[in-house]
Amino acid sequence: MEKSKVKPILGVSISPLLYKRLKTEIGDRKVSAFVEKAIVAELGKKDKEKEHLKQQLVKGYQSIARSQKRQAEDEI
């Protein structure tokens, strides 16, 4: 993925208490980097979940295909 020099701006509404905690624990100038890192981590989890579901689907289709093949052989 190519990094551009200009980053898009995303406006997000959060509770004042959460924002205050972010600024206190992360620092004034580091909130954006922290949020970006958290989003990347969460999207990574979703990608892994999708891959797991895809593998389960493939296994299910393979099982059905084997079952149908056995059925066809039994009919012969």
Image (cartoon, rainbow, N blue to C red):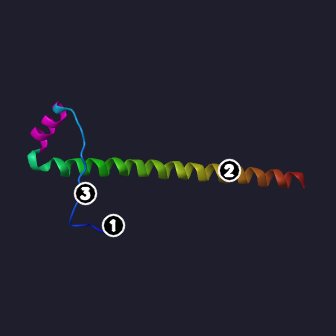
Q: Earlier in the sequence, mark 3 or mark 1?
A: 1
Q: Residue at x 25, y 67 (%)?
A: 4
Q: Position of residue 52 (x, y in %)?
A: 49, 49
Q: Is residue 56 left or right of residue 38?
A: right
Q: Is residue 24 left or right of residue 65?
A: left
**What is the magenta range?**
17-26
Q: Residue at x 36, y 50 (%)?
A: 43
**Of residues 34 and 5, which is closer to you in this image?**
5
Q: Is residue 64 left or right of residue 2?
A: right
Please state which amino acid type lies under the numbered disc 2.
Answer: Ser
Q: Earlier in the sequence, mark 3 or mark 2?
A: 3
Question: What is the quadrant of residue 5 in the picture?
Answer: bottom left
Task: Determine the CA span between mark 1 and mark 2.
Answer: 37 Å
Task: Determine the CA span between mark 3 and mark 2.
Answer: 46 Å
Q: Earlier in the sequence, mark 1 or mark 2?
A: 1
Task: Determine the CA span between mark 3 and mark 1.
Answer: 15 Å
Look at the image and say whether residue 67 sits in the magenta stretch.
Answer: no
Type of secondary structure dominating the magenta stretch: helix
Find numbered disc 3 in the image and state the secondary structure of the residue it sits on.
Answer: loop
Judge the density around disc 2: few (<14), some (14-19), many (≥20) Cα neighbours within 10 Å.
Answer: few
Please state which amino acid type lies under the numbered disc 1.
Answer: Met
Judge the density around disc 1: few (<14), some (14-19), many (≥20) Cα neighbours within 10 Å.
Answer: few
Residue farthest right in this picture: 76
Q: Which residue is mark 2?
A: 63
Q: Which residue is mark 3?
A: 8
Q: Which mark is residue 1?
A: 1
Q: Residue at x 25, y 49 (%)?
A: 10
Q: Nearer the viewer, mark 1 or mark 2?
A: 1
Q: Position of residue 74 (x, y in %)?
A: 86, 51
- In the picture, the quarter occupied by the C terminus is bottom right
Please state which amino acid type lies under the numbered disc 3.
Answer: Pro
Query: Do tag 3 and tag 1 residues touch (Cβ < 8 Å)?
Result: no
